[in-house]
Image (tube, helix red, strand yellow):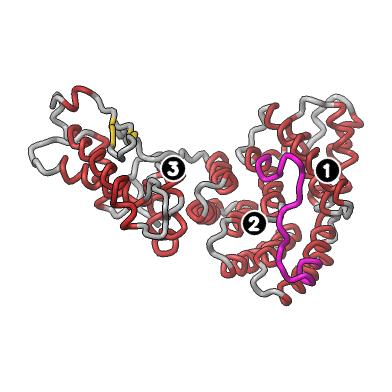
Amino acid sequence: MPHRKSLTISLAVLIFCLSASLAAPVFAQDDIAAQKLKVAELIKQTKYTESLPLLEKIVVAEPNNPDMHLYLGFALIAQADTTKDAAQRKALKVRARAEFIKAKDLNVDAPIVDALISSIPPDGADGAAFTSNIAANSLMVEAESFFSQGKLDEALVNYKKALELDPKLYHAALFAGDVFVQKGNYAESLVWYERAIAIDPMIETAYRYSATPLMKQGKTEAARDRYIEAFITEPYSKFSRGGLVQWANVTNTPLAHPAIDIPSDIKFDDKGNANMSIDASTLLGGKDDGSSAWLIYGVTRGEWHKERFKKAFPKETVYRHSLPEEAEALRNVIALATADKKVKLNPSLVKLKKLDDEGLLEAYILLARPDAGIAQDHPEYLKTNREKLRRYMIVYVLTGGGGGEKPS
């Protein structure tokens, strides 16, 4: 996937949160301070390639300045966008990745940095084409070069032409939105981001990018909703997670899932039987708080491993831990624990039951307890249950795991 999908507004968000490092000449060397001010102005004008030689000088003078290494990484990516020679382009992206790693090593305070590093292959190889439509793809490549040089009007013309040639070209609409953000026309940028979302609502990027113009206007609550949509669309993406964390840091919002202790460690033997590690006092009935009900968790998981999975997923030949398996196992625990009305449930079981009663058990599993197998069921669940995922985020995650807020 084309790399600027991940990088352009990441820079805007980082500048929003780290602008102090560029905003004023706070360093002793007057020439370096002047260069920083010039870099700030060039980045504001999206003239990333022009900022490159200045940033290279700054990091030599201040090798331990994490923010400058971060901005240099973006400038190198921008230079790669304007470079036609494949070998030179790869070399520039390798350097950009190294700068992001250097910024991380220097403890730059930006959750998105890990995602930036992972978005660039170690060898700097190009991502996929924007579209199989050759003419539209050519327009997109040229538009990216224009954008990196601050030629916003020329870039916008190309994005629009590319979208005419391929009406399903997500990145053409997305990047047109970027242009209007840079122009300060936030209302129009949202129109284009919404157009990208309409093209493919299963991609997180346009949701996340659309939060930037809202943040710039101080509309943090509206931005919150965009970051939530990005996260529930692709919850296992470092970019969607980083965007939400960035928002939380700016707004001093605690993020947490409900604290639920599931006292089991499931392993399957060669015959598919489940072996579960569980506290001895639970097995001996030493706790009258529903804890012994966790025994049914392992039994249910064993049934799914041996035969239930094949029936539920006939097209899959290899067993995996799935969302319906985990949900059924937890519901069986809740049912067994609540069978005796005299038992006062422990806090974990109380929370699990509350989640189930609210219809949010699957949302909790997908967002708080996913593994590689369960994660495969997220896209299908998202198609018909976006509201439940959104509600779980608002009621639980954005209240520090407490579940005290009603969704707005």
Which quadrant of the structure image shows residue 99? top right
Q: Secondary structure at mark 2?
A: helix
Whole-angstrom CA distance, mark 2 to mark 3, is: 34 Å
Q: Residues within 10 Å of mark 2 (few under 14, many from 20)?
A: many
Residue 221 visible in this rendered orientation of the protein? no
Q: Secondary structure at mark 3?
A: loop
Amino acid tagged 3? Asp
- Mark 1 = which residue? 92
Q: Residue at x 61, y 69 (%)?
A: 195
Q: Position of residue 216 (x, y in %)?
A: 65, 52
Task: Look at discs 2 and 3 and give the one toward the viewer.
Answer: 3
Amino acid tagged 1? Leu
Q: Residue at x 81, y 49 (%)?
A: 78
Q: Position of residue 246 (x, y in %)?
A: 58, 42
Left or right of 31: which side holds 13? left
- Mark 2 = which residue? 213
- Mark 3 = which residue? 371
Which one is earlier in the sequence, the residue at label 2 or at label 1? 1
Residue range of the region highlighted in magenta in the rendering: 117-138
Amino acid tagged 2? Pro
Residue 136 part of the magenta segment: yes
Q: Residue at x 57, y 54 (%)?
A: 219
